[in-house]
Image (spheres, rainbow, N blue to C red):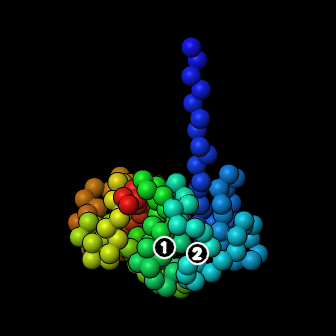
């Protein structure tokens, strides 16, 4: 006897898509001159989505540009379904790219989303499942020993950070 399994199509949001338009995703950005599905100011709340809409949300190089990252993450939780995956990629506070972009409003380190801080920010519905240093520009940096200690002496030792969360509603 054959069993038919019905898979519901996952709803995915590419929040602040920029030039990274993803097929099969809802792509939203504030800029009018790039390809998007929705143009919306990401500092304007609420976002144009119903509560519990998305199974996955991807935010690459977005959060550091927004006026209130905590309010943004609360809005992301609102539009996420239970057990949704949220991926956030930001430049490390000590990265050269972070320090040279005059549009950045917030800085992030590997400790920015520790459990006690999530509680302090009233983001308890987020569970940090992954934290990773990314080296997209200077791959050789991943081989530097003792980065945790050296970071206080060398500005620019890190490039980017990846945080993955699971929404626990």
User: What secondary structure is found at the residue carrying circle 2?
Assistant: loop
The quadrant of the picture occupied by the N terminus is top right
Crowd rating for badge 2 (residues with CA inside 10 Å; few <14, some 14–19, many 20+):
some
Residue 6 percent coordinates (x, y): 59, 35
Kind of element beneath mark 1: helix
Q: Is 124 placed above or below 101 here?
A: above
Q: Residue at x 59, y 26 (%)?
A: 4
Residue sitting nearer the eye, 74 or 8: 8
Question: Which quadrant would residue 166 be assigned to in this image?
Answer: bottom left
Give the residue at mark 1. Answer: 75
Residue under circle 2?
47
Q: Is residue 110 left or right of residue 40?
A: left
Where does residue 38 sit, x and y in percent of width and height? Answer: 70, 70
At horizontal 65% and vertical 68% (from top left) the residue drawn is 28
Residue 116: x and y in percent read 23, 70
Farthest front residue in view: 1
Q: From the top left corner, tell me how far across and down residue 65 is, in percent.
A: 52, 79
Q: Earlier in the sequence, mark 2 or mark 1?
A: 2
């Amino acid at each position: 006897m054959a069993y038919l399994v019905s898979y519901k199509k996952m709803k995915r949001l590419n929040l602040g898509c920029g030039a990274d338009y993803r097929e099969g995703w809802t792509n939203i950005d504030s800029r009018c001159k790039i390809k998007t599905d929705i143009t919306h100011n990401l500092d304007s709340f609420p976002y144009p989505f119903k509560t519990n809409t998305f199974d996955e949300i991807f935010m690459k190089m977005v959060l550091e540009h927004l006026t209130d990252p905590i309010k943004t993450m609360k809005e992301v939780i609102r539009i996420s379904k239970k057990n949704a995956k949220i991926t956030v990629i930001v430049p490390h506070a000590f990265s050269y790219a972070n320090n040279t972009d005059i549009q950045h409003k917030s800085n992030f380190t590997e400790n920015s989303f520790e459990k006690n801080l999530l509680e302090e920010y009233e983001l308890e519905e987020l569970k940090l499942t992954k934290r990773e240093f990314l080296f997209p520009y200077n791959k050789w940096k991943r081989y530097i020993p003792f980065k945790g200690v050296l970071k206080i002496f060398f500005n620019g030792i890190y490039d980017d950070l990846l945080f993955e969360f699971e929404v626990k509603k």
